[in-house]
Amino acid sequence: MERATLLRSSLACNRLFSFRSSHSLPLRRSVSSSSSAPRNHHHHRHNRHLIPNLTGRSLLRRHWRLLPASSLSSSSSAFSLRRERRFSALSPRAVATPTQSPSEFSGAQDEVAEKLGFEKVSEELIGECKSKAVLFRHKKTGAEVMSVSNDDENKVFGIVFRTPPKDSTGIPHILEHSVLCGSRKYPLKEPFVELLKGSLHTFLNAFTYPDRTCYPVASTNTKDFYNLVDVYLDAVFFPKCVEDFQTFQQEGWHYELNDPSEEIAYKGVVFNEMKGVYSQPDNILGRTAQQASFFFSWPFVHALFPDNTYGVDSGGDPKVIPKLTFEEFKEFHCKYYHPSNARIWFYGDDDPNERLRILSAPNESKIESQKLFPEPIRIVEKYPAGEGGDLKKKNMVCLNWLLSDKPLDLETELTLGFLDHLMLGTPASPLRKILLESGLGDAIVGGGIEDELLQPQFSIGLKGVSEDDIQKVEELVMNTLKKLAEEGFDKEAVEASMNTIEFSLRENNTGSFPRGLSLMLRSMGKWIYDLNPFEPLKYEKPLKALKARIEEEGSKAVFSPLIEKFILNNPHRVTVEMQPDLEKASRDEAAEKEVLEKVRASLTEEDLAELARATQELRLKQETPDPPEALKAVPSLSLHDIPKEPIYVPTETGDINGVKVLKHDLFTNDVLYTEVVFDMSSLKQELLPLVPLFCQSLLEMGTKDLTFVQLNQLIGRKTGGISVYPLTSSVRGKEDPCSHIIVRGKAMSGRAEDLFNLVNCVLQEVQFTDKQRFKQFVSQSKARMENRLRGSGHGIAAARMDAKLNVAGWISEQMGGVSYLEFLQTLEDKVDQDWEGISSSLEEIRRSLLSRSGCLINMTAERKNLTSAEKYVSKFLDLLPASSLYEATTWNARLSSGNEAIVIPTQVNYVGKAANLYETGYQLSGSAYVVTKHISNTWLWDRVRVSGGAYGGFCDFDTHSGVFSFLSYRDPNLLKTLDVYDGTAEFLRQLEMDNDTLTKAIIGTIGDVDSYQLPDAKGYSSLLRYLLGVTDEERQRRREEILSTRLKDFKEFADAIESVKDKGVVVAVASPDDVDAANKECNNFFQVKKAL
């Protein structure tokens, strides 16, 4: 699946101690008007189960299962019987919803556990997460179970297996895809997809690490939660895939031949996914660094880990994946997917005894440590580059250390996490600051400290480096680390880091990521290596000890020895240099083609005919729906289980100094969350591309009295963080878009005055005078956009199509699409030529935005804290100008409506097509949400992903603008995918659906609408609904329309969606060869734009 694909804030929850912040600038939000919350409000719109978010670190191989696939059945009765005997002692059973609270069972739990075949290993109260945690072992099988009980309604289950691969064929990854493709109890093609359709899950996924595979689920509905658990347990222990060669072909790899006269091609979901991964330079760098650290399985040998499993790619190398056999695939499951190799996690407010009842129904997985090298090594690798820009300035260099030959104790890990934050965690952190200010590169690469695996690593470097400066970068890294060891850190920096870390730990804000899953992944970081699973959950004692050491000995005595021991004096260093290569992509394609030509040449005419027949047979089975009786086997809820009203957020509207204030009285554990909103409508159109850089400048430049380092430290010492970003969206029924700058901040309620003082300082006192820092911002933004083009091409395509269809989309694309990248490319030179003009433009943006007349305040906290904060809000507002110096302007621009191909060096494509349904006369109904989700989970899933081989295919309906979009992700096809999109209306017209299927579709939609939120997200969602004019009355009406959706609504929606086929615009981010082929086949179908 995908490596490190959740938001960085979520990733920080998975790692034991990760405190580094990122300052990504969000683009236009897509906010569902019937939803209680905007989805993925910091990033481009997409279906959360279909396309991963690609903003996280890429060094760790965590392949997220966001796209399960179907499977097909065959028989192997002897194997099945043998497996049933192995697992009968720990098989899942159907369960009933508990009627008593966990506390009522606590006294009897030991007795119940004994009766069910479990022994209690240990029990602890975890004050940090207000939980009782009990570790059990199943006597017969050896399976270990962690049962964490508390009052969190967002219940979490996970089962984790150690799965260390011996090669880069991707077995763990392919198996992770495949086990959810049908099982003994649920023998349909894709029970996972049925759960997507008809569940209230708050998390439903699976992912592969370099040494383990995780299968987690979460839900706030107890009945739904146990349904999910039941399906997952049956899937991992009794999957159909080990008896079904076609599932292996579909998810892993196979030869595809549509006709004996055609060329043979490789197909397979994981194969194409990993071709996409291996097209991204940052990913290649991360994989090279890790594999070099353990064992480099490409042309370089014994480069961080030559002796253990981390030296190969658990996700799979596209060059190696076709070497995997079905027999090896089956054996891997038999070897590792055994209860004795399982770690099972339960968390939440459900009955702890019921957990054991569900479950009461020798392997070689131990991960060996890597010994440290006696001396450093160096690796040089090529990556595929585009023709744009100076190739000599596109090198990458990264220094990587394996920090220890054994796992570290908790206090050392915490201290290293603290050190990581001090060195790299903020723009003011010295190692990060010095590297970026050096002018030797465009952006940081390397993940800093990584401690999720058995042994911790440290990586740091730069990309966008001139070939003449590579050695200078290495010297600068080493010299800076030596200086930090010799001189230590400023007292203010240490205080800021301590406050940031304490705030992060105590707030425990995991966003949309379930808290129980965050704790599970944290615990697994020790448990999977047979270490204490309770230890990672308890930070109070080591944190207290660390603070005491710093107080008594001074920070230099604490951190300098760590830098010296683990980095400077550590010979286990691997330096990876990445060189751009214009020909690499074409050479890789040619090498693959040569292999396939040799395969074809070795086959007889009869063999080719048989291969073509097998290809057709596989496709037929992929596109044949499951029979109704099989679908009914998957447990689901009924409409009676669904609340008839939406989730309401308490909102009190008031007025302070003539400014509207929204207040949300919610329990936040004494944290005050606030948003200060400014109207962007008076901003000149030509200044829009500068807005993201303006936002970054506010937080990363200094004032008259404070350097940017001092300002950054002050924010870290006094608050939980401040961010600034633009928000733009269409508003249904209005011509003018919603366009705002939002300043978000949080602090303990006792620090409310500091928070608003610092927001004022950032907005009004920061000076736009530091030309060199601004040049860094431009270089960083350009590097970030280039990375998005390669890794998140679907988002780029979606933004580009929106820019062709509505003004809000055009505005967003100017601030975060291809147009923005082109602006950045010209701005680099302009900074030196006309810095005074750019600085003046930044000041003009500030003057256009800041005024009480265009301001709105949003606050979320307990009532008493909301009341006490009002006087600080009043003081803040008094300092703002009464009105803007500029009149509101009218933005009325769109990109040309022609079909467009954004050409980049890649092995996979991202294909989009979109049109505005409102312009055809379509009137919004809540049923559209149900239909849209159903199209994604059925038609597009089957045709684009399952039989087409793409990693993802989905559609999205922006109900504010009326734009309906089709998108694919890591897609081997181009025109074929467009044909699928064009067949959607006919699919709906021919659709037959029984009541059970319709009910699942409705319930799945409600699950999206009622997505689980923490208090800060509830307050923020309420703010967005206010800005977009979405009332509670409309939300109730849309909900009723969702719940009353009928088959006729699907048929009627076909007429609206026909306009996408007839009038839609197409944007593809694609390889040059595929675009050339498409233009030859369809007579210059695409206008071609080279972006890299």
Image (cartoon, rainbow, N blue to C red):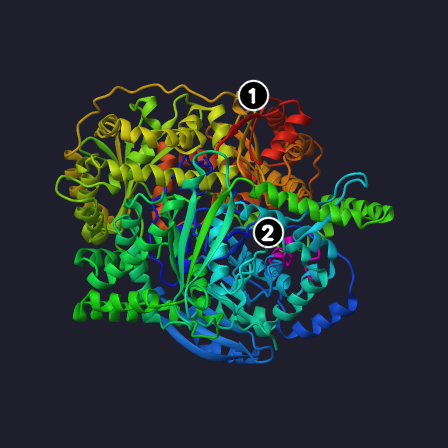
Q: Which amino acid does label 2 sit on?
A: Leu
* Label 1 sits on residue: 920
The verdict on residue 548 being magenta is no
Q: Give the range drawn in magenta.
A: 174-196
Q: In which quarter of the image is residue 515?
A: bottom left
Of marks 2 and 1, which one's residue comes earlier in the chain?
2
Q: Residue at x 23, y 40 (%)?
A: 701
Marks 2 & 1, CB-CB < 8 Å contact: no
Q: Where is residue 840 in the image (x, y as percent from the top left)?
A: 22, 27
- 549 up-or-down from 574: above or below: below
Q: Position of residue 1086 (x, y in %)?
A: 59, 25
CA distance separating discs 2 and 1: 34 Å
Q: Depth check: give the residue in front, 77 or 347.
A: 77
Q: Where is residue 31 in the image (x, y as percent from the top left)?
A: 44, 36
- 162 up-or-down from 436: above or below: below
The verdict on residue 175 being magenta is yes
Q: What residue type is labelled 1?
A: Thr
Name the side, left or right, on which 607 lies relative to 663.
right
Most extreme residue toward the right, as rendered?
606
Q: Which residue is drawn at 19% across and 53% down?
A: 750
* Label 2 sits on residue: 195
Name the side, left or right, on which 131 lies relative to 423.
right
Q: Quadrant of residue 358?
A: bottom right
Q: Depth check: give the residue in front, 270 or 378.
A: 378
Q: Position of residue 16 (x, y in %)?
A: 39, 63
